[in-house]
């Protein structure tokens, strides 16, 4: 326990901890940056009430145990953003894309971009997922034009497996299976 909260994971530079209601201001600030939101909704800020309304969904993951959910990403005590490691939400087409396994996703403040934080946090959760939790497959998705996020996925060990249309935009999926993970470590 650190600061009364269970620390899920620490890397060389990062601390991943459970998000709490106290993170509301951090989340609002994060989602207020048009560049952060560019590939998510065209750069529009997420209203505070919407984020407040999402908090019960985010926090409910912790009731299922410590293995899956959303975590704050911190470096030197600074909130950089968040990362999730969760089952897919089944929130849209297409049905022919394989979304089995656990989805990894991240959202970091712009000043944290290009520092390797998203890759470091993703690698740590992917490794923990395969080595400790026992997941069979990890995947991530983004808009095809989001080169930065695609680089993070590649550096995290995921491989491009699909390109598909989602509401008129080209999306990509990157994935890695447990057997691919193990064979890559031999």
Image (spheres, rainbow, N blue to C red):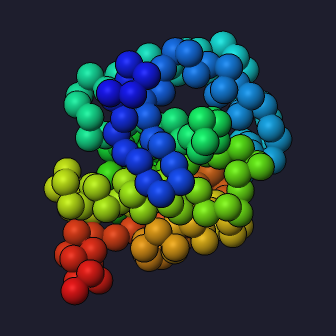
Point out the image quarter for the N terminus. Answer: top left
Near-viewer residue (85 or 100): 85
Give the position of the C terminus as an image quadrant: bottom left
Residue 95: horizontal and vertical position, in percent? Answer: 39, 55
Viewer-proximal residue among 145 and 25: 25
Q: Horizontally, is 172 left or right of 4 in the view?
A: right
Left or right placement of residue 121 versus residue 30 in this view: left
Q: Is residue 165 visible?
A: no
Q: Residue at x 60, y 71 (%)?
A: 151
The x, y position of residue 73, in whole percent, is: 54, 42
Determine the residue positioned at 29% across, 83% down. Answer: 184
Front residue of 137/20: it is: 20
Q: Taking 160 as reference, is 127 left or right?
A: left
**In the picture, residue 118 is in which quadrant?**
bottom right
Residue 122 horizontal/vertical position (percent): 46, 57
Q: Nearer the viewer, residue 79 or 55?
A: 79
Residue 142 image-quadrant placement: bottom right
Q: Residue at x 27, y 70 (%)?
A: 177
Residue 11 in the image: state x and y as whole percent. Answer: 44, 54
The answer, for residue 98, to whether it is visible in the render is yes
Residue at left offset 53%, top offset 54%: 13
Q: How many marks?
A: 0
| For residue 147, side relative to residue 165 (left or right) | right
Question: Quick check: 146 above or below 9?
Answer: below
């Amino acid at each position: 326990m650190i600061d009364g909260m269970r620390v899920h994971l620490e890397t060389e530079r990062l601390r991943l901890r459970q998000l709490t209601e106290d993170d509301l201001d951090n989340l609002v600030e994060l989602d207020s940056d048009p560049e952060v939101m560019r590939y998510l909704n065209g750069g529009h800020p997420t209203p505070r009430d919407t984020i407040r309304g999402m908090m019960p969904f985010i926090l409910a993951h912790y009731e299922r145990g410590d293995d899956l959910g959303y975590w704050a990403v911190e470096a030197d005590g600074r909130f950089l953003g968040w990362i999730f490691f969760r089952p897919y939400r089944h929130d849209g087409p297409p049905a022919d894309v394989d979304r089995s396994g656990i989805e990894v996703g991240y959202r970091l403040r712009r000043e944290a971009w290009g520092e390797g934080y998203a890759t470091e946090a993703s690698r740590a959760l992917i490794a923990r997922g395969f080595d400790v939790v026992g997941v069979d497959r990890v995947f991530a998705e983004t808009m095809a034009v989001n080169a930065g996020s695609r680089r993070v996925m590649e550096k995290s060990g995921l491989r491009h497996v699909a390109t598909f249309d989602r509401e008129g935009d080209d999306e990509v999926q990157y994935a890695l299976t447990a057997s691919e993970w193990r064979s890559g470590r031999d």
